[in-house]
Image (cartoon, rainbow, N blue to C red):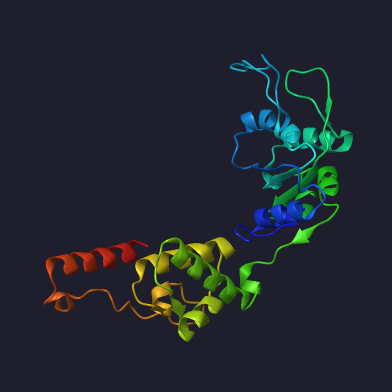
Amino acid sequence: MILGETGTGKGLLARAIHEAGSRKAGPFVAVNCAAIPETLLEAELFGFERGAFTDAHHAKAGLFQTAHQGTLFLDEIGLLPANLQAKLLTVLEDRAVRRLGSTRTEAVDVWVISAASEDLKAGARRPRFREELYHRLAVVTLRLPPLRERGKDILTLAEHFLAHTCTEYGLAPKTLTDDARAALVAYRWPGNVREVANVMERVALLTDAPVLTADRLELAAPPGRPASPQRRDATPAAALEGMSLEETVERLERARILEAL
């Protein structure tokens, strides 16, 4: 089981475990338990037979069977409905699934990696998550620290995403000033690695300058510190004098987009 806040890279770690293991030649099947409606999740995981429910015109294998001899990654396992928790526990213990509408079980051979953004051990003490399922899933538990606890790893990630965005969009290389680097380290990053990637992509696309300063990042000031000064490209009317219509429109559009962001 992988535990970590949203955006810390639990899915990437799960895939890395799969690719480094003995089942790397098999399929890697990922499913977000929070993204599929409860009424469909059982059929997706365990499959169904023809006629098992309305519109079931043909049989379909579930994700457990799709991941046979590979790895099944169950993201946001803590949001799995209670009735499916019991069925999942049975599958893990019996190593076999029974499709909806079927009277027989079929053996499956899969690695199961689960992930959660909250401590399920505490949740297992409440009715919301089955304690026996938790112990079955958490034989090995890995914890991914939030980005705010990773120190200068933030800078390494920011520079990586900045370079990647410039390469992907054919932009000139950009660098970070010392005050921008300090702002990146000081920020709390509630969205973790995903938020870093989004911020660096945005600033790379919306800034023509080859050097990025702290005010370009537009990060919220940490508690106890003053907010960053207002952007210098707020485009006062005097700054537009002498520009062509095209340049004026471009400058105003940039300012409005940045205000909206």
- Location of residue 259 in the rendering, given as x and y in whole percent from the top left corner: 32, 65
Q: Is residue 70 above or below residue 193?
A: above
- Can the viewer see residue 83? no
Q: Nearer the viewer, residue 38 or 173?
A: 173
Q: How many marks?
A: 0
Q: Nearer the viewer, residue 134 or 95?
A: 95
- Can the viewer see residue 254? yes
Q: Quadrant of the C terminus?
A: bottom left
Residue 17 location, quadrant: bottom right
Q: Nearer the viewer, residue 48 or 219?
A: 48
- Location of residue 55 in the rendering, given as x and y in whole percent from the top left corner: 58, 17
Task: Residue at 65%, 33% (x, y): give it.
Answer: 41
Q: Is residue 229 above or below residue 148?
A: below
- Location of residue 222 in the rendering, given as x and y in whole percent from the top left corner: 51, 77
Task: Residue at 41%, 61% (x, y): give it.
Answer: 169
- Location of residue 150 in the rendering, given as x and y in whole percent from the top left corner: 65, 74
Q: Is residue 182 left or right of residue 52?
A: left
Task: Residue at 79%, 32% (x, y): give it.
Answer: 87
Furthest-right residue in this view: 94
Q: Is residue 78 above or below residue 229?
A: above
Q: Is residue 81 left or right of residue 157?
A: right
Task: Residue at 80%, 57% (x, y): give it.
Answer: 141
Q: Is residue 50 above or below residue 86?
A: above
Furthest-bottom residue in this view: 178
